[in-house]
Amino acid sequence: MENKAEKKIIPMTSIDSGIGEQITSDLYYFPFQIVNVVFYGYPGEGNDWVLIDAGMPRSGDNIIIEAEERFGKNNPPKALILTHGHFDHVGGITELIEKWGMPVYAHELELPFLRGEKDYPKPDPTVEGGLLAKISPYYPNEAITIDGHVQALPQDGTVPFMEGWRWIHTPGHTQGHVSLFREKDGALIAGDAFVTVKQESLYKVFTQEQEISGPPRYLTPDWETARISVEKLASMKPMVAITGHGRPMTGKTLRENLALLVEKFDEIAIPDYGKFVDDK
């Protein structure tokens, strides 16, 4: 296995870092530094559970500690589901695989980035936004290599070990980005299809000021596809959303903000300038 992202120290955090929160009876979100991971499963020693995303570089030990407090030691997750393979969503994956040896699932279009075959586009520091966008060349974009541990999500839309959930292809931020949805209660794990913090702004990321936003601007190469993905998720009328960045959003606040994002996507989400829009 090879994960160059794990070798980097990315010195940024938020006031919520390390403070998890129960969102539904079986969904728990754990923010660490500036990204969220999700634990699916009822808390309790020995209960089955699934991990969604693998956090920032060098976050593996913190994820393990949090998981062991919720589900007990020597109780690995049944699976790790990746919304996508950007550095801040796979940063702790090598540590987690070495500790737990669980299967990893991602969309088939994401597999080349997880098998060492293809790098993501380099982040765009020229994009409109704040300091986190300006320093984005520091963020890793190289493929990781976990071949032998990762496989494609089932083509029928089901999510392994997550009964009642289905995965939704929500590309734009990456080619193989997925979100997870449970119809019975409208629970949505959105990844970075949209987020609830202005991810380009260091101040807003640190304070976690809640604000509906499109996917992070400095790492989103296909804005028209990203728009379609947001429209798709909004049409499903989710009741609670855990996004890759920012605090969870629920109920009327979520529905109104998603409707606003759809209506004003060009204004809210798409940058006025930057290589991913100028090149188009």
Image (cartoon, helix red, strand yellow):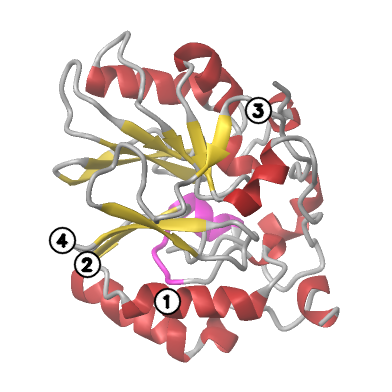
Q: Which residues are magenta?
A: 202-212
- Residue type, numbered disc 1: Lys
Asked if the stretch drawn in magenta spans residue 208, the answer is yes
Q: Position of residue 117 (x, y in %)?
A: 80, 40
Which residue carries the number 4 mark?
Answer: 184
Disc 4, disc 1: CB below 8 Å?
no
Pick whichever of labels 1 and 3 is earlier in the sequence. Answer: 3
- Residue type, numbered disc 4: Lys
Pick whichever of labels 1 and 2 is earlier in the sequence. Answer: 1
In this rendering, the label closer to the viewer, 4 or 2:
4
* Residue 239 marker: 2
Secondary structure beneath label 3: loop
Residue under the image location 62 percent in, 68 percent down: 172
Residue under the image location 85 percent in, 78 percent down: 279
Real-space CA distance between mark 1 and mark 3, rounded to the nearest whole angstrom: 30 Å
Residue under the image location 69 percent in, 60 percent down: 219
Which residue carries the number 1 mark?
Answer: 232
Disc 1, disc 2: CB below 8 Å?
no
Real-space CA distance between mark 2 and mark 3, rounded to the nearest whole angstrom: 34 Å
Secondary structure beneath label 2: loop
